């Protein structure tokens, strides 16, 4: 899916905000259109249809959008319907999403939660059982000695 594909009719009607390479902006953006970042942005971007971070783009902040495409660096909190981390993309932080794709060599470090997911981990329950098996005998040995 391209940034300006047929699925994004709303974007072309509302225009695009571009942060060019060599530009640094600190603040907030609220738009129903597209935001493309090749420079640096620190702050909040809300309600965007599409946010794309180019290879030279760097974003530190909170992102809320319909679609997010990352080729550069994003460090922050993400709440998007569709997230694409391309091969040169790096995402660090906490992410809520409906659909997530990470290309080979794309990087994600943090926590990801699928919106509305019914899947529940039982790992903590099993870890407690394992800890009781492993830790309890060694404590008993110390108390008996």
Image (cartoon, rainbow, N blue to C red):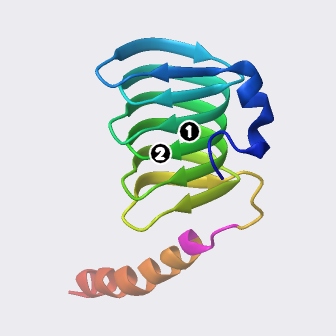
Secondary structure of residue under mark 1? strand
Q: In terms of secondary structure, what is the magenta stretch mainly?
A: loop
Decide which of 79, 34 is in the foreground and name it. 34
Q: Position of residue 26 (x, y in %)?
A: 40, 13
Q: Which residue is mark 1?
A: 78
Circle 2 residue: 70
Report the residue at 72% width, 23% height from top: 32
**Disc 2 to disc 1, C-alpha distance:** 12 Å
Which quadrant holds the C terminus?
bottom left
Label 1: few (<14), some or many (≥20) within 10 Å? many
Q: Residue at x 78, y 44 (%)?
A: 7
Residue 45 appears at what percent x and percent y? 57, 23
Q: Is residue 123 magenta?
A: yes
Of residue 17 and residue 5, the one placed in the foreground of this image is 5
Q: Which residues are magenta?
A: 120-124
24 within the magenta span: no
Quadrant for residue 125, please give it. bottom right
48 in relation to 96, above or below = above
- Of pointers 2 and 1, the one earlier in the residue sequence: 2
């Amino acid at each position: 899916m391209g940034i300006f594909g047929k699925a994004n009719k709303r974007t072309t009607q509302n225009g695009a905000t571009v942060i060019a390479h060599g530009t640094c902006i600190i603040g907030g953006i609220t738009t129903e259109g597209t935001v493309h970042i090749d420079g640096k942005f620190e702050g909040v971007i809300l309600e965007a249809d599409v946010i794309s971070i180019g290879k030279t783009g760097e974003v530190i902040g909170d992102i809320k959008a319909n679609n997010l495409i990352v080729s550069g660096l994003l460090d922050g909190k993400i709440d998007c319907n569709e997230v694409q981390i391309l091969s040169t993309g790096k995402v660090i932080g906490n992410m809520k999403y409906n659909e997530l794709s990470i290309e080979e060599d794309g990087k994600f470090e943090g926590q990801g939660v699928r919106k509305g997911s019914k899947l529940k981990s039982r790992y903590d329950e099993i870890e407690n059982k394992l800890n009781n098996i492993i830790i309890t005998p060694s404590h008993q040995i110390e108390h008996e000695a």
